[in-house]
Image: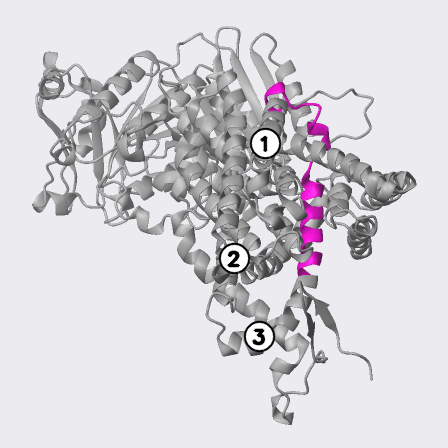
Amino acid sequence: MSAPPSTMEADHVRCYRSMMTTSSGIWLGDSPFQFALPVLLYQIVIIFIVSHLIHFVLARLGQPIIISQIVAGMLLSPHCLGRPLMFEKLLFTHQTFEQLGTIAVLVFMLYFFLIGVKVDLTMIPKVGKKAVGIALSSTLLSYAAVHLAASAMDSEMPANFKSNNWPISFAYRWSLTSFVVISSLLRELNLQSSKVGRLALSAALIADVLYMFVVACIGTFKLSNKGGHHLRGLIGLASVLAVVGTILFAMKPLAVWLARRTPEGQLLGQASFVVVLLMAFASGLLCMLIGFDFVAGPLFLGMVLPGGAPLGTTLVERLEHFMVGLLMPMCMAIAGMEMDLSSLVDKTQCGFMVLFLFLSVASKFVGVIVPCLFTRMPHREALSLGLIMITKGIYEVGIAIKWKGKEVADRQTYTIIMISIIVISGSTTPMIRHIYRPEDRFVPYKRRTIQHAVPGDELGILVCIYAQENVNPIIALLKALGPSANFPVCAYLVHLVELVGRAHAVFVPHKRRDKSTSVVSQSDHIANAFYHFESQYPQALSVLPYNCISPFSAMHNDICSLALDKKVSLVVIPFHKHVSDDGSIGFANPAAQTVNANVLQYAPCSVGILVDNGLCEGGAQLHRVGVYFFGGADDREALAIGERMAEHGSVELTLVRFLPPREWRESGRDELIDERMLTRFRQEKANGNAVVYREEVVMDSEGTMGVIRESGSHFDLLIVGRRERKESPLTAGLELWSEYPELGLIGDLLVATDFGSPVSTLVVQQQMRMMRGGSREAIDSPNNTPKAKQTRSRGKQHKTLKGTRVSHQTEGGTDRGRVRHHQDSSAAKGTNEDGGSGGEDGDCEARRAGGGSGGGARGGLVGCECAWGDQGHGKRSVSEIGGKGSAPDGRHFVAFRFDSSRRDERREVGRVRARI
């Protein structure tokens, strides 16, 4: 009979009864807790549930998920719960810890291999002196502090510390800033693309590479001096070189060959994927055979392999979520189960441990802060970087488990180390969240809008591209802006690519490739299209392309940083969905919706979301542009863009202003700004055949929808304001059907697949400014101004006017209407208040020609437009100015427009100005 499996501990041997893998089931009398596989499944499920329940609570305190997983292990440990019968004798027995430990080793190997693949070694020559200085000063100062303290107190240290030379091992292990820990932390904090995040990753990468080299040299030196066998040192050095050569000259070429056989844009095949995983395990085995850490081989192999597509993307798609979401919680829980708070009995040893930990962390923090302050880094960024660099995580947990297994650290020391990891990570992570917010630097201090841009100055526009499908619409929009020598445009092109299979976020200018280059990327195709567009406008258009490779959740940092540095006036980003001609969704990128929302929230300038519905396919040009104006800062910015396009000779601009009945209109500061801008627009722009100004008087959202449904299909492009949180009776109720809040109510209505024929739309939000409490408002909006009183008629006239609209249309004029309209069963009557009765609608042509009776100096009737519609909906405007229209039921609606020189209008504006 074979001997039972056993495991050797510090001073005794444990013998275990053999355990079969699977059971026959409870109905045949087998207990599932007596078989390995059911127990393992129970353990995985319980650990997963408990860790996520704990994280549900701790996440609200800003804690990282690794803390929740370790705490879950502490709660499930028999050492912390008083050895309850079920956990000790059924689920988490000493025998089951052996198989859990084996699984944990495999998970650690795969996790470090995955992180290594994401490392970009080409970044090492590109890192600046600041990153190298931070890496060296923080590592050396931390090691020196612990080493000097241990040497000074050598006579007072406990005997077990002296016997295994533990302080020295602790000094050089704890002084390291692990790239694995920093990468995981930055990903959880969403700081990979931030300035501090990039610097932390670069410094950690430098420290890791130097550490691997130093450890290899020190290990070989110790091996050669052990027992006086110098030949053993040479053999050790040769074995290290053999492992490195195997990885570089055998495994790497094989992995590169497998990647090249994979078609572009696809993942590795199943066989190729398995071969890559086997190479990771083999590299770990080779390192264990020569006495190195089992994670060193997979980490080094991953670092030398090409990241990104297809190798990095395949590992992320097929391995990362399963490993990080299911297996890693189990590993961290195992580490928590090994803790024993009752073992903290030796006060002297605990005191030395706390002292060494404090010296290591404090000196490392100082080693990070000093170079940052020497290079005049802002204090908040320097403090945040210091907290990031001292954070502990999965690497330190693995080291603690290794020390305990090799008896370098007893249970008390192990428990103190694990507590220090919980305390350090649990305190630094919330502090980083509170101290460092990259978005704070995007707070604008100057107006950067199209409306306030100086005419004749170069107009800076930042355009974002997700895919090649966005190129033609963006180019058509830039072409409509009419770049010329008098109105130059500088377009900063940013190609947005999701960061997959890489740890470093990249934001660099695009390098123009030679024509002889055979490999052309998607970024090259996009940049070449804009280069060709630039060549059509010499001395008038400049295109500067950039490549942004970042997680979608952090792309707005790079976009807003570039917009702030280049002082652009407008950021244009594509809508995350493409609406086809038939109204269906052609393709969608849901993650891009997050980018658009973040850019709208943090952009230091105006933002436009371009909804493409076949905009100028085939290289055609925009000719008919419409602007819907309801009022407010966003609508004024939309009108400013339309004005800029109107300077282009081939663009016909139509401004449609929506107005409620006069009794409902507000008279605040915002409304006065609208009136001034519209008056200037009519005086300067609406004096030719290329500009049309219309006013539509509507009662409610149904009337608004009717006007939009009629006129929307007549334009190549519609420009509307986003108007977030802007209440109006003309759009009341539309928020109930809003599907895309980033487009606003009108923009969302225009892209609705069930709302007529969709039209390409540019939704504009004017530059926002940060207010107290974190709220934001348009920079052109009145601040701290009491809201004007709004008078609404709820009586007979409100019921009479429901469902009607009155249109005022001006082609090349500077007039503004003051309208009174009535409705009865037979006809609609127009009344000129200052000029007397305007007569019945049958005399419309005569009155238009004669100017109206009693008009005199006060301004008579200069034109009219007849419109008709049915009750509750304003529909179908007659295009002929001054013509007649009738509804199927015989009702008539007539709208008159009058000259803006009327004295009562001037008196009304004067009263508004006096109130403000």
Give the residue type at disc 2. Answer: Gln
- Residue tagged by mark 1? 148
In the depicted view, which residue is nearer to us: 787 or 835?
787
Q: Give the distance between the C-alpha atoms of the residues marked 1 and 3, in whole angstroms.
A: 45 Å
- Residue tagged by mark 2? 69
Relative to 92, residue 610 above or below: above
Looking at the rendered image, the disc whose residue lies closer to the viewer, 1 or 2, is: 1
Tell me where residue 372 appears, x and y as whole percent. 51, 22
Q: Is residue 555 left or right of residue 124?
A: left
Q: Quadrant of the C terminus?
A: top left
- Residue tagged by mark 3? 91
Label 1 environment density (alpha carbons within 10 Å; few <14, some 14–19, many ≥20):
few
The part of the chain drawn in magenta is 103-131
| Nearest to N terminus: mark 3 or mark 2 | 2
| Nearest to N terminus: mark 1 or mark 3 | 3
| Nearest to N terminus: mark 1 or mark 2 | 2
- Which corner quadrant of the image does residue 775 belong to? top left
In the depicted view, which residue is nearer to us: 237 or 156?
156
Give the residue type at disc 3. Answer: Leu
Under circle 3, the secondary element is helix
Q: Is residue 640 left or right of residue 476?
A: left
Task: Let me know if residue 620 appears in the view.
Answer: no
Label 3 environment density (alpha carbons within 10 Å; few <14, some 14–19, many ≥20):
many
Q: Is residue 561 left or right of residue 99?
A: left
Please identify the residue farthest to the front as the structure is shown. 155
